[in-house]
Amino acid sequence: MEFTHFDAQGNARMVDVSEKPITHRSATAEGRIALSEEAFAAVAGKTVKKGDVLTVAQVAGIMGCKRTADLIPMCHLLNLTNASLTFELLPETREIKAVCTVKTDGKTGVEMEALTGVSISLLTIYDMVKAIDKRMVIREVHLVEKHGGKSGDFWSGTF
């Protein structure tokens, strides 16, 4: 197996995608944050003193998608055509599930952008709610599916 992020001398490098064709690509990632009963109720009831947690986290996650190349050293700067982030409140487990889908027409995929969007949104929830609950747990951040590119489609199945 060839490791594409290293040159012949073992130095880190950005993968050269200049000869690849432009294709439509998309990726979806998700993750969860578990909260205490009090914190979950505050987020759901929109009573957190810092503001509407999910709206702020949604904007932060989308901003994170757009800044992925600034955060992950070997990621290419991509012209995203869409980034969406939604949340699902799961009262039975006191979790919030974040789902991020990112699209582009480009030479490389958007998996890292989708994963970054989910991660930043969950970190934003943590930041806004930590005064109520410092024991929140972020977990199960993973790629759900991706489409396009040389490696084709991917679907993770049941996580």
Image: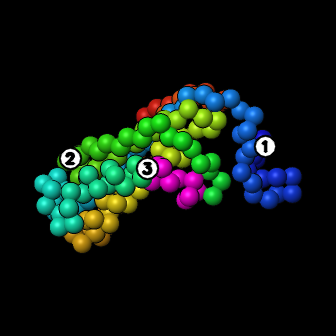
- Which residue corresponds to mark 2? 92
Give the alpha-carbon distance from disc 2 to disc 1, as whole Å.
45 Å
Q: From the viewer's perspective, is 74 left or right of 111? A: right
Q: From the viewer's perspective, is 86 left or right of 119? A: left
Find residue 158 and report its horizontal and vertical position in percent. 43, 34
Residue shown at the point (75%, 34%) measured from the top left: 19
Query: Closer to the camera: disc 2 or disc 1?
Result: 1
**Three-letter residue code for mark 2:** Glu
Does label 3 or label 2 sit earlier along the sequence?
A: 2
Residue shown at the point (23%, 46%) measured from the top left: 89
Mark 3 Cα-neighbour bin, 10 Å: few <14, some 14–19, many ≥20: many
Residue shown at the point (48%, 50%) measured from the top left: 66
Q: Which residues are magenta?
A: 64-72
Give the alpha-carbon distance from disc 3 to disc 2, as whole Å.
25 Å
Q: Secondary structure at mark 2?
A: loop
- Which residue corresponds to mark 3? 117
Q: State the mark number for residue 2.
A: 1
The quadrant of the image that shows the C terminus is top left
